[in-house]
Image: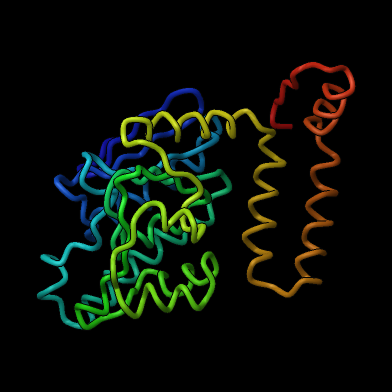
Amino acid sequence: MNYEFLQIEIKNKVALVTINRPPVNPLNSQVFQELANSMTLLEANKDIRVIILTGSGEKAFVAGADLHEMIDLNVAGMLEMNKASRSAFSLIEQLSKPVIAAINGVALGGGLELALCCDLRICSEKARFAFPEIGLGIIPGGGGTQRIQKIVGQGVAKELLYFGEMIGAERALALHLVNKVVPAEELLQAAKDWAEKLAAKPTIAMRTLKSVVNTGANVDLESGLSMEAAGFAVTFQTDDRKEGMNAFVEKRKPVYKGT
């Protein structure tokens, strides 16, 4: 997989995908296309079990959409770019494999929207977060208004969206916007440690778990419970379930085969 703006490294069943548009890695139409294409290929690759998304350099995870591309677009062109962003973000969110965002600097606008599509978020203590769109006379268009409130609640979401002000890593952690904060020099290793732990989990159970949690967030409780029961039945029939339970009883480390 060769891309102009993405770097992909595969090791220990983990794919590290780095957005590389220095110095601040803005998102443009080509980046959206490359993200969609690469994620489709990584999803199909059975040897890859977890994906890490990060940005190059120390300044930014992603400092929003590329205003140089946006500024001269008409409404039709902007809607086309917006469609590409939403398509790429939804694809990432709906992957059957866990996706970890390793947030190394600022995550603004579309960059924060990209992070919100990931299952888990680890950030550097230097990371900063904001939805600055209100200050540009627009609103987020890549799903930010919807995904943020499901994570931090509507009241806090409105504060972040209405004021458009930057928050630091520690407040992001307190709001559950990120799962973990680490020193900058430890960020990638922390993300890789999590990814390798997840890669060792039984793949059918992990895929089913992600599907049930994601889908259940958008349905009523009874429907969610029904999906959970169906998913439990699917995983109970697997060889990995038998291996996991036998390993527990026998006090040994399980060896999962994805069947």
Q: Residue at x 68, y 65 (%)?
A: 216
Position of residue 168 relative to residue 42, above or below, is below
Q: Quadrant of the C terminus?
A: top right
In the rendered structure, the answer to whether residue 49 lies left or right of residue 232 reads: left
Q: Residue at x 26, y 71 (%)?
A: 132
In-image side of 145 versus 196 (left or right): left
Above/below status of 191 relative to 86? above
**Residue 3: x percent and y percent?**
25, 41
Q: Residue at x 33, y 34 (%)?
A: 8
Of residue 69 and residue 119, the one placed in the foreground of this image is 119
Residue 214 location, quadrant: bottom right
Residue 73: x percent and y percent?
A: 15, 76
Residue 71, given in percent of the width and then of the height, sits at: 12, 74
Q: Give the color scheme: rainbow, by chain, secondary structure or one colour.
A: rainbow
Of 165 and 109, the residue lying toward us? 165
Q: Which of the image's four quarters has the N terminus? A: top left
| Nearest the eye: 115 or 169 | 169
Note whether 162 is above or below 122 in the view shown: below
